Image (tube, grey):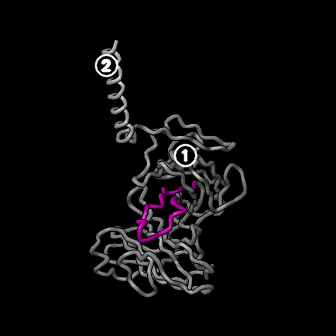
């Protein structure tokens, strides 16, 4: 009896050691179950949500049509007043996170309805760890006159992230950018009507990187790295300069965000439209609205004209604006 009890005791100890080792080192490698937290009247039922692959930052974005087909490279509609889609946002991390969804057509944020609700430019939702939400959106297309357009779905995350020396820059945006064809509209591209922001010859220290970059810095300077903070006058409009470069031939629509809200620069040209190349870069100074308190600023450039499907957005790191 004593021998049997000893064997059982030793076996139990070995089991606990093995289980503890597995729990500590290998549990994270097992498949994780994604939870659909959608609570809308219009529901999207997915049976394969655990095959939803996030990007390297732990977030995912997909677009579905009403027939639950994934829309990836282009979207064709028959000149309706509106279209209905599902936008699926995924937080595949082990922490909860506030997320925002913006939709842009031809580089401009547009209002949309969520589940037949009121028009809004931004939808915000707090996603739990391993949480996914399928947002039913309705877009008004009646204002489009050309048959070739661009549509972008911009997913912002890490909304509570504050830049600092001990907080490295994170990939806080994901996007899907595609061509939007409206059958029945006049032949032509809406991009031909956009007013371009002038670019300059690329600086050698920027060209040497041979990769896309985007920095916000002091007015009139060419930034070669992202500063953590800038000092701005309290209660006064202030200038900043954006330096952006992409050696690939891409047309971008650049928007500035203050505390995760897009900033309209002026009534005639609320954003910057520019073309990248290996020989040129954007180095442009803009005036931003007065701030009473310290805020977080960043810039996101949405690709409009590109050769590769699903060309990604170009984002600066976040920078703290401290009022003085």
Q: Quadrant of the C terminus?
A: bottom right
Picture coordinates of residue 160, whole percent (x, y): 54, 63
Front residue of 4/198: it is: 4
Quarter of the figure with residue 227: bottom left
**Which numbered disc covers residue 7?**
2
Picture coordinates of residue 180, whole percent (x, y): 53, 56
* Residue bounds of the magenta highlight: 157-182
Element type where label 1 sits in the image: strand
Q: Residue drawn at (38%, 83%), measured in percent from left and top? A: 222
**Which numbered disc covers residue 132?**
1
- In the picture shown, does residue 205 fall above or below 89? below
Please indicate, yes or no, whether residue 193 appears anywhere in the rendered image. Answer: no
15 relative to 284 in the view: left or right: left
Residue 158 lies in magenta, yes or no?
yes
Quarter of the figure with residue 37: top right
Quarter of the figure with residue 166: bottom left
């Amino acid at each position: 009896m004593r021998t049997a009890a000893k064997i059982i005791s030793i076996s139990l100890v070995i089991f606990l050691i093995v289980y503890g080792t597995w729990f500590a080192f290998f549990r994270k490698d097992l498949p994780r179950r994604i939870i659909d937290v959608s609570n809308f009247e219009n529901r999207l039922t997915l049976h394969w949500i655990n095959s939803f692959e996030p990007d390297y930052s732990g977030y995912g974005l997909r677009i579905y049509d009403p027939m639950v087909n994934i829309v990836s490279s282009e979207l064709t509609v028959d000149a309706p007043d509106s279209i209905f889609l599902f936008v699926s946002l995924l937080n595949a991390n082990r922490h909860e996170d506030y997320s925002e969804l913006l939709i842009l057509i031809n580089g401009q944020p547009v209002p949309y309805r969520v589940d037949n609700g009121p028009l809004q430019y931004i939808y915000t939702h707090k996603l739990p760890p391993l949480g996914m939400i399928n947002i039913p959106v309705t877009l008004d297309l009646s204002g489009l006159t050309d048959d070739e357009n661009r549509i972008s779905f911009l997913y912002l995350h890490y909304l509570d992230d504050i830049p600092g020396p001990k907080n490295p820059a994170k990939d806080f945006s994901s996007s899907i950018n595609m061509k939007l064809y409206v059958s029945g509209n006049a032949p032509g591209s809406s991009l031909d009507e956009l007013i371009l922001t002038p670019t300059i010859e690329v600086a050698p220290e920027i060209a040497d990187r041979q990769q896309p970059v985007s920095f916000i810095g002091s007015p009139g300077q060419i930034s070669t790295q992202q500063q953590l903070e800038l000092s701005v006058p309290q209660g006064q409009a202030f200038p900043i300069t954006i330096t952006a470069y992409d050696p690939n031939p891409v047309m971008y629509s650049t928007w500035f965000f203050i505390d995760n809200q897009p900033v309209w620069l002026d009534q005639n040209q609320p954003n910057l439209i520019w073309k990248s190349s290996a020989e040129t870069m954007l180095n442009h100074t803009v005036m931003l609205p007065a701030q009473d308190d310290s805020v977080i600023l960043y810039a996101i450039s949405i690709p409009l004209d590109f050769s590769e499907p699903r060309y990604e957005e170009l984002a600066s790191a976040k920078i703290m604006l401290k009022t003085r």
